[in-house]
Image (tube, rainbow, N blue to C red):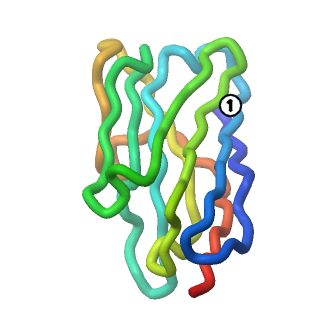
Amino acid sequence: VQLQASGGGLVQAGGSLRLSCAASRRTFNMNSMGWFRQAPGKGREFVAGISQNGYNAHYADAVKGRFTISRNNVQNSVALQMNSLKSEDTAVYYCASNYERRPELVRVTPNEYQNWGQGTLVTVSS
């Protein structure tokens, strides 16, 4: 599965952005999906994940209540709606996928994901 992330940009603190990730293959609906981010000088951290069937989602504590992950298995895409953005949300955001045999699984660590998109930069000004 090839992944293409988009939607990043510059936004003021308190604003919103919506990231999208388009997948290249029809087997998208067999993959769990995740969003990660990497700020300058820091490691890649989990942001949100969603199961293959879309019924289960998990969020990092830092974004819980502000970000929402969703997927569209017809359009082969996953989105991350980011509200109430803070300066500490500034990072390059990556989408990732992992082929699953169990539809309910959500992955939360980078090494659990097989495929990665190229990243999209989100800058939040204070």
**Quadrant where the image shows the C terminus:** bottom right
Of the pair 10 and 14, the residue shown nearer to us: 14
**Occupied quadrant, residue 50:** top left
- Residue 119: x and y in percent read 64, 59
Callout count: 1
**Occupied quadrant, residue 16:** bottom right
Amino acid type assigned to the residue bearing label 1 in the image: Ala
Of the pair 31 and 125, the residue shown nearer to us: 125
- Residue 36: x and y in percent read 46, 56
Residue at the image point whose x is 73% and y is 67% from the top: 9
Task: Tell me the SS state at disc 1.
Answer: strand
**Quadrant where the image shows the N terminus:** top right
Query: From what the image shows, is residue 98 above or below residue 108?
Result: above
State left or right for residue 60 relative to residue 21: left
Query: From what the image shows, is residue 47 above or below residue 10?
Result: above
Residue at the image point whose x is 40% and y is 46% from the top: 48
Query: From what the image shows, is residue 67 above or below residue 58?
Result: below
Q: Which residue is mark 1?
A: 23
- Residue 46: x and y in percent read 36, 55
Residue at the image point whose x is 44% and y is 78% from the top: 88
